[in-house]
Image: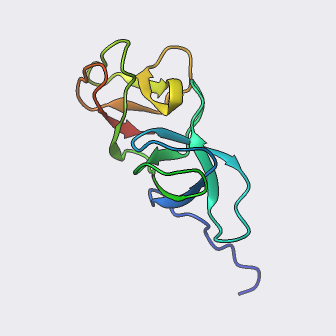
Amino acid sequence: MTNPNVGVYEPGRDLTGRATTAVTGKHFLKITGDRASVGGNIAVAHADAAGRVCGVSKYDAAVGAVIGVARGNSRVTFVATPPAGTALTAFAEVEVGANGTAVARATGVAVGYTVTGTAVGVDAEVSLY
């Protein structure tokens, strides 16, 4: 076999990133730059409001620290909601709010849906797209 195509990441597998800003656990993340030459981790930070995501932070991380990224279609994971705003209803589509939190989808990119209703300021159970 010549010139094989070897997968970089397998579907639904968690990966590790390197925080380019301080990251809070249970927040949506985005890729912020190229893979690091040392360690090979992707660069990540909180996702932009209404933007795309690469996964959800598994715990808090300081700038430059390695962080676990939970990802995978149909994976249900906890995502923080903002301290003020509107509660989420069961099966509501969500998009990224301020600082990588989960909010009800308005005009942004749908990144998942809630499995059950969630009060304001409480972690939401989100099934990722």
- Check the picture and name the quadrant holding the N terminus: bottom right
Number of numbered callouts drawn = 0
Choose top left, top right, bottom left or bottom right for residue 124: top left
Is 115 left, or right, of 9 in this rendering?
left
Q: Residue at x 57, y 57 (%)?
A: 17
Residue 85 in the image, given as x and y percentages of width and height: 38, 12
Residue 32, picture quadrant: top right
| 38 is higher (above) or lower (below) than 82 | below
In the image, taking residue 2 as reference, residue 97 lies left or right, namely: left
Q: Residue at x 59, y 43 (%)?
A: 45
Q: Relative to residue 110, is residue 74 depicted above or below?
A: below
User: What's the residue at 52%, 30% (across, down)?
Assistant: 99
Residue 54: quadrant of the picture: top right
Q: Nearer the viewer, residue 77 or 46?
A: 46
Residue 63 is situated, as x and y percent measured from the top left of the image, at 59, 51
Observer-nearest of 83 and 71: 83
Q: Could you say where residue 11 lies in the image, as x and y percent from the top left?
A: 49, 58
Q: Residue at 52%, 24% (x, y): give it.
A: 98
Q: Quadrant of the C terminus?
A: top left
- Considering only vertical position in the picture, is 98 above or below 35? above
